[in-house]
Each structure stands twice: as structure tokens, then as C-alpha cells.
Image (cartoon, coloured by chain):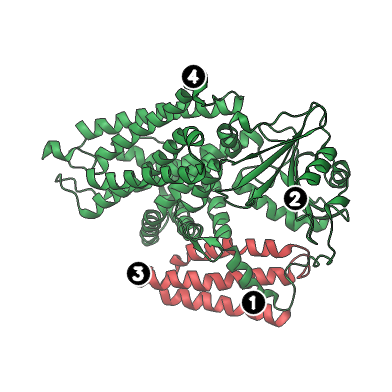
């Protein structure tokens, strides 16, 4: 059971959530910008895309302390980044 | 609801540290934000009656524009029209400075017509008291700039990130006992239990408001960085703002269409709206724009007070608006509603009051959070408390209560200053910072317990002074102090009066604790126990 307990790993998790959370928010906002309603050319949609960055970023940052360890946080968020950046750059 | 204990422990730590770091600047942002809900009222309160020009009974705005632009150079570049607004001239423009952002030494030229259609003008130095409260709200009073944003705005942006973390972690570690403890105010238990219960209840009940505020403040602080990131990562070659560059035509104010014609264009997208003001901007450049403030009491307003419609006056095209009902307007409308959610402008006067109280409750949330931290770390066995505990107690009292006292004293001095000083807005800032730093230094010299009683008593006195100054103005009109005679400004002083009562009550409670409360506490009179 001891192994299942989550480690605090404050610095590692906070940095993962702050940095990878922000890049992930950009990627998700980018996917919405290109593939979401109206597409990339919709008038003034950029403002909305900018606004959705902060809630995505904040949600990732606040729940990244649930990862079992700092290492796991970097790993999972890194993969998520990889996936969404691939989608963004391959299909746009 | 069951949550694993290791998760609870982690989020308890997150809550405590994010709260402690961000609490005090957020306290200032919140109570000052509550005051900005009544920015217009503050403006009316501090505007002397001499700033009111006589207005013709049937004022022709087109004639007013024609005469003013004929005689005044500055009016040819731009001006603002006000329609039937309390204590606002029908027309004004800036001789010095602009109305963008905080303007401490602006000079405004007001213009009106007499009953015989003669132009009358007067120059005034507008009081920026309400704008200074707004500045305090946005920066917590932290001066300096970084790039073209205020340093204080970035600090509040970072504090808001911590604040969001504090909200999420607070809810998580409250989950197991949420239903049981939400409405149980264990008043007959210890005082700290009561603080904890009310901290939790306020936090949970106003949670949606707090989530909205924290997310919007992050955007207000970092929108430049976000846009830059979007440009680099997402948009690339695609233009982000698709609006075409304006044609390079120089326009002249002499070709301005009639006021009614511009309003008629705006009415095509806002048929049920009234127009409260029209700002004519950059009139002799290709970027010439008229910004109409459109108001409809039955609709959600997306600006601080009104919705906005931007029209190019010479070509008659609608450039943009916050209320475009067409399909392509969906993004602007959505974004404008995010602003509205922060400004609390969607619920009319009632909404403003709701936001006022939510802001005050937010300030209470941060203050009580600090008190709970202090209580938890209190050494219950001895009178002497650790350095950390004493330091945070002094800082909490000095900064939070000191900032409120500084605002109250600034309001007390505001009318006197405008009688005697020429640079009134700089004088306001001097008063604020002098009182604020005096309170902070005093808190560190005399300790939190004693200073809290002093500051609260002074706050009560300062609030009480506002209506008394009005009474003095009525009794001694030769003093030059103008009493508040409008319903809204009398309301402001009645609010001050009730705040005086509240602060006096809090001062009494604090004094009781100081004299006969728990002895092993920073809130007890250390000299007496010696």
C-alpha cells in the first residue's frame, strides 16, 4: 500500500503543471482554433481562443498534484502534449 | 464523500501555502473592487457643483458640436457627448492628457449651449479619485510598470494563479465534511471554530464568483503573453485579427454626419437600446471612430456600464460591437460576457450590489484565512509566540486594515484637498500612501493586537466623518465644502455611516480580546501579562 500513496514532490509537480500545463493549454486552444466551429479564419475568434487558455492551464495545474509522483506528472503531461501538438501540426 | 487521506494532506498543504502567499494582495484587490462597483457614484460625489455647466432646455447637439469645433482646436480631434447624465456636461474634450487609463493631471474642457444657443465653456481638472480606487483594485497599490502593463497587475495575475489553486484545493479538502459542516456555525464552540466555519461557508457559497474572478484576472494580466503564444504556436502565417487596415484617407471634422444619423446606424443592430454617451475619437485620422455607449435595462450589459458599438462616422460602417446579434458575432459576444462576469455589469443596480457584497465577502475570505493560519500555529502553552506568527499577524493587520484606513482617510480629505490643492490627484496618492505605510509601520512597532484596535477605531471615525463633512457643508456653505444632495451620493454617505458602525463593533470585539481574551495569543495584550 505504501507505494500507492502519492508523493508530494512539490517542485517537480508544480513545475510540470505550470510549464507543461501551459503548453498543453496552447495546444488544446490551437486545436479548437483550427478544428473547432468557424475554423481558423472566423472573425474575432482569436479572443475566445485566448480566453480558454487560462481555465485549461489552471485545471491542469491544480489537479497535477494527484499524480503519484513528480516523474509521473512529467511523463503523462509530456505525452498529452505530444499527442495534441501532433494533431495540431499534422492536420491543420 | 470519501477522499483518500494522502490526497487530503497534499491539498491541505497546497491550500495553506497558496492562500498565505496571495491572501493580502487579493484582500486589497477585493475590497477596492467592491468600491469600484460604484465608480460613477464616487465620481458624482467628488465632482463639485461648480463643474456643472448650465444646459439649454432643448439642447441641439449638432449645433453644440459645430460651435465647439469652430472655436476650439482640440475639439476637432475628438470629444465626448453625454446624454442626460447626472453631473456630466453635454460635451467635453481633453485639453491635456486623454481619458485612457489613469490620468492624474488631465485638463478637461466642458462645453454647453445657453438658451440663446451661445457656446459656454469652462476648464476643469477632473478628480481621479474613482480611477485611483480602480487602480488600487487592479494593482493592490503596487507601483511601477513592466513593459506596458503595471507591475502590480502582473503580481495580481500571479496571485490569481495561486488563488485558483487555493480554491480547488480548499474544495477538495473540504469534500469529506462538506455536507455536515457547511451550515453549521458552531458559535458556542471556540472562536477559531466559528472563523473556520464562516471561512468555509463563504468560500463554498461564493465559489462560482471566485472561479470567474480568478480566471478573468489571469487573462487581464497575461493576455499579451497569451496572444503572443497563440501567434507563435497556433496561428503562424494566419492573421489573428482579420480586420482590414483602414484606408489611408485623411478625414475632416467638418464632414461629420449629424448625431441622429450615427445613432440611426447603431439602432440597426441595437433597436431597443438608449445611448448614454458618444465618444468621437481620432476625428482627423484614417482611424476615425465613434464609440457609442448603448444601454438597455432588460439586457445583459457587457462593458462596465453599457455595451459598446464602434462606428466609422465618415463612411457609416459599423466597425465592431459588443452586442452584434448576427451569427458571426458569437465570439465577440462570448468574450464580452467574460468581461461582464468580472465587472458585474449584467444585473443592473441590484447586480452591482450583489457584486459589492461578494467582493467584501471575498476580502473576508482572505482575512479569515490568514487568521486561521495564525490560530493553527499558535503556541497555546506560552504567551511568547514564534517570530513567523508575529510577523504574519502584524503584516495582516497592517496591510489589510491599513489599506482600508488609507482609502477612508483619502475620501475624508478628498473634498478639502480639491479646495486647497492644485494637483489634487497627486495629493490623494500622498494621503493614501502616507496613511498606508504609517499603519504598516505602526503594526510592526506596536504589534497586531494593539494596532488592530487602533486602526479599526480610526476606520470607524473616518467613515463617520464623511456624512459629517456633508452636514458641515450645509451649515457652513461659505467653507466651500459641497454637501451631497443627489440620491446616489447620499447613498454613498449612508453606506459609509453603516461601515462606521461595523468597524466600531469590530474594534470593540478586538479590544475585548486584547484585554480579556485567551492569554497565550498574539491577540492578547503582551505588556499586561509581561
Residue designated by label 2: B73
- Chain identity of mark 3: A
Which is more N-terminal, label 1 or label 4?
Answer: 1
Q: Is residue A90 left or right of residue B252?
A: left
Q: Is residue B300 left or right of residue B474?
A: right
Q: Which mark is residue A1?
A: 3
Residue designated by label 1: B232
Tags 4 and 2 on a common chain: yes
- Chain identity of mark 2: B
Camera-side residue of B106 and B238:
B106
Q: Which chain shows up in red?
A: A
State the SS at label 1: helix
For chain B, give the colour: green
State the SS at label 3: loop
Tags 1 and 2 on a common chain: yes
Q: Are marks 4 and 1 in contact (CB under 8 Å)?
A: no
Which is more N-terminal, label 2 or label 1?
Answer: 2
Depicted B244 relative to depicted B458: above or below: below
Residue placed farthest to the front in the image? B71
Residue designated by label 4: B476
Numbered disc in front, either 3 or 2: 2
State the SS at label 4: loop
Q: Residues within 10 Å of mark 4 (few under 14, many from 20)?
A: few
Say which quarter of the image contains residue B65: top right
Numbered disc in front, either 3 or 4: 4
Query: Between marks 1 and 2, how big is the CA–CA gap?
Result: 43 Å
- Chain identity of mark 4: B
Camera-side residue of B179 and B455:
B455
Amino acid at each position: 500500500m505504501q507505494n500507492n500513496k502519492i508523493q508530494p514532490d512539490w517542485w517537480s509537480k508544480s513545475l510540470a503543471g505550470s510549464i507543461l500545463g501551459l503548453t498543453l493549454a496552447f495546444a488544446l486552444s490551437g486545436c479548437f482554433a483550427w478544428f473547432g466551429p468557424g475554423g481558423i479564419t472566423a472573425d474575432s475568434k482569436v479572443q475566445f481562443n485566448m480566453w480558454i487558455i487560462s481555465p485549461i492551464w489552471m485545471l491542469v495545474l491544480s489537479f497535477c498534484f494527484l499524480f503519484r509522483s513528480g516523474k509521473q506528472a512529467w511523463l503523462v503531461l509530456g505525452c498529452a502534449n505530444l499527442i495534441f501538438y501532433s494533431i495540431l501540426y499534422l492536420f491543420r | 464523500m470519501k477522499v483518500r487521506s494522502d490526497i487530503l494532506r497534499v491539498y491541505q498543504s497546497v491550500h495553506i501555502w497558496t492562500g498565505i502567499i496571495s491572501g493580502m494582495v487579493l484582500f486589497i484587490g477585493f475590497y477596492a473592487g467592491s468600491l469600484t462597483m460604484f465608480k460613477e457614484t464616487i465620481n458624482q460625489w467628488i465632482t463639485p457643483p461648480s463643474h456643472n455647466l448650465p444646459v439649454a432646455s432643448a439642447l441641439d447637439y449638432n449645433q453644440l458640436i459645430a460651435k465647439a469645433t469652430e472655436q476650439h482646436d482640440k475639439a476637432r480631434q475628438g470629444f465626448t457627448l453625454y446624454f442626460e447624465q447626472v453631473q456630466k456636461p453635454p460635451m467635453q474634450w481633453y485639453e491635456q492628457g486623454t481619458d485612457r487609463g489613469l490620468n492624474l493631471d488631465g485638463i478637461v474642457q466642458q462645453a454647453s449651449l445657453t438658451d440663446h444657443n451661445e457656446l459656454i465653456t469652462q476648464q476643469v481638472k477632473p478628480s481621479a479619485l474613482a480611477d485611483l480606487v480602480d487602480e488600487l483594485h487592479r494593482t493592490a497599490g503596487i507601483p511601477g510598470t513592466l513593459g506596458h502593463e503595471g507591475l502590480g497587475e502582473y503580481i495580481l495575475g500571479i496571485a490569481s494563479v495561486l488563488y485558483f489553486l487555493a480554491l480547488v484545493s480548499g474544495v477538495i479538502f473540504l469534500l469529506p465534511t462538506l455536507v455536515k459542516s457547511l451550515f453549521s456555525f458552531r458559535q458556542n464552540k471556540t472562536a477559531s471554530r466559528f472563523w473556520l466555519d464562516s471561512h468555509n461557508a463563504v468560500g463554498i457559497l461564493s465559489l462560482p464568483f471566485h472561479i470567474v474572478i480568478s480566471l478573468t484576472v489571469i487573462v487581464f494580466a497575461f493576455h499579451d503573453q497569451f496572444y503572443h503564444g497563440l501567434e507563435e504556436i497556433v496561428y503562424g502565417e494566419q492573421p489573428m485579427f482579420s480586420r482590414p487596415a483602414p484606408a489611408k484617407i485623411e478625414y475632416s471634422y467638418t464632414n461629420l454626419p449629424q448625431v441622429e444619423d450615427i445613432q440611426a446606424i447603431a439602432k440597426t443592430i441595437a433597436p431597443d437600446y438608449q445611448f448614454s454617451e458618444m465618444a468621437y475619437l481620432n476625428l482627423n485620422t484614417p482611424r476615425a471612430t465613434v464609440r457609442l455607449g448603448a444601454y438597455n435595462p432588460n439586457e445583459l450589459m457587457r462593458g462596465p456600464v453599457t455595451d459598446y458599438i464602434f462606428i466609422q462616422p465618415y463612411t457609416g460602417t459599423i466597425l465592431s460591437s459588443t452586442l452584434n446579434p448576427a451569427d458571426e458575432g458569437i465570439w465577440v459576444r462570448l468574450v464580452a460576457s467574460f468581461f461582464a462576469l468580472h465587472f458585474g455589469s449584467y444585473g443592473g443596480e441590484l447586480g452591482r450590489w450583489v457584486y459589492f457584497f461578494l467582493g467584501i465577502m471575498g476580502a473576508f475570505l482572505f482575512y479569515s484565512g490568514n487568521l486561521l493560519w495564525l490560530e493553527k500555529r499558535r503556541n497555546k502553552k506560552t504567551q511568547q509566540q514564534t517570530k513567523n506568527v508575529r510577523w504574519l499577524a502584524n503584516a495582516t493587520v497592517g496591510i489589510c486594515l491599513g489599506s482600508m484606513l488609507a482609502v477612508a482617510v483619502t475620501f475624508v480629505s478628498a473634498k478639502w484637498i480639491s479646495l486647497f490643492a492644485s494637483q489634487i490627484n497627486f495629493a490623494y496618492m500622498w494621503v493614501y500612501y502616507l496613511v498606508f505605510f504609517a499603519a504598516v509601520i505602526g503594526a510592526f512597532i506596536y504589534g497586531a493586537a494593539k494596532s488592530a484596535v487602533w486602526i479599526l477605531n480610526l476606520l470607524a471615525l473616518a467613515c463617520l466623518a464623511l456624512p459629517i463633512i456633508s452636514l458641515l457643508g450645509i451649515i457652513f456653505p461659505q467653507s466651500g465644502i459641497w454637501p451631497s444632495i443627489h440620491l446616489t451620493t447620499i447613498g454613498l454617505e449612508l453606506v459609509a455611516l453603516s461601515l462606521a458602525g461595523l468597524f466600531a463593533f469590530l474594534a470593540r470585539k478586538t479590544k475585548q480580546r486584547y484585554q480579556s481574551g485567551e492569554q497565550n495569543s498574539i491577540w492578547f495584550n503582551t505588556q499586561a501579562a509581561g
